[in-house]
Amino acid sequence: MVMMDLHSNGRRASTGVGGVMLLAAASLLVGCTAAPASHADYPGCGSIEEIASSADLVVRVTYVDSVEDVIYPDLIADVNPTNNPQGGLSDEELEAARRDGAVEVTVATVEIAEVFKGDGQRGDRIQISQLGTRDHSSAETTLLSTLPEDGSAVVFLRDWREAPYDLLNPQQGMFIVSADDAVRTLSSDSAFDIRSLDDLRAAISER
């Protein structure tokens, strides 16, 4: 494994590096554990109440804009194999490892429309980092940048302080809300099968 620090291409690390680069740590920090519908690298929760309790911030947001970025690893220049397993690689091999370790992210700026939990106010703008871009995203990720203009999303977030917020889970941690307050869940878990914003508010309040 290449020893590395992570930084944003042309930007300071906090632009794109948050929990998306620390998923293993997230699974240890939150109360949720593995769940059948969870992404393999994310903590999974058994109910809306549980993920709400684990989140630092739960808010309904509208999309403002976003920036796509690539996070590249900074390989540690240490030739001692005890400290760096890649210490004997050539410059070309190290550069190839750096390219292979690159991660595409989208950092969305959103405006808070409603606060359910946490330190936020209506009208505040926050940033949320997600793995992938419009051209390169997995089936498990729904980017906030794809929200309809008249829609919103309820998001369950981890606060990384100096970095953008992250969803606790890419599917369980976001619900799409249409203009008529109908809710679409992204999770296949029946415990997250909520159809209206009022029902979602009630479930969150039971945490």
Image (cartoon, rainbow, N blue to C red):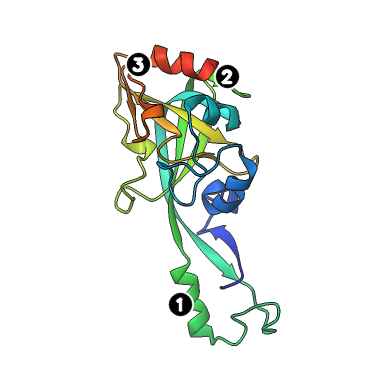
> Which residue is depicted at the point 54% across and 50% down?
23
Location of residue 78 by image quarter: bottom right
Q: Which residue is mark 2?
A: 121
Which circle's residue, 2 or 1, is located before the other in the chain?
1
Q: In the image, what residue type sits under mark 1?
A: Ala
Viewer-side residue, 22 vs 89: 22
As drawn, the label of residue 129 is none
As drawn, the label of residue 96 is 1
Q: In the image, what residue type sits under mark 2?
A: Gln
Which circle's residue, 3 or 2, is located before the other in the chain?
2
Location of residue 192 by image quarter: top left
* Residue 131 spot, x, y in % from top left: 43, 49
Q: Is residue 12 visible?
A: no
As drawn, the label of residue 196 is 3
Quadrant showing the N terminus: bottom right
Binning the other alpha carbons within 10 Å of mark 3 as few (below 14), some (14 to 19) or many (20 upward) gives: some
Binning the other alpha carbons within 10 Å of mark 1 as few (below 14), some (14 to 19) or many (20 upward) gives: few
Distance from disc 2 to disc 1, alpha carbons, whole Å, reads 44 Å
Q: Are marks 3 and 1 in contact (CB under 8 Å)?
A: no
> Which residue is depicted at the point 54% across and 15% down?
205
Q: In terms of secondary structure, where does tag 1 sit?
A: helix
* Residue 147 spot, x, y in % from top left: 32, 31
Binning the other alpha carbons within 10 Å of mark 2 as few (below 14), some (14 to 19) or many (20 upward) gives: some
> Which residue is depicted at the point 46% across and 15% down?
201
Viewer-side residue, 204 vs 35: 35
- Closer to the camera: disc 3 or disc 2? 3
Which circle's residue, 3 or 1, is located before the other in the chain?
1
Q: In terms of secondary structure, where does tag 2 sit?
A: loop
Q: In the image, what residue type sits under mark 3?
A: Ser
Q: Are marks 2 and 1 in contact (CB under 8 Å)?
A: no
Viewer-side residue, 190 vs 140: 190
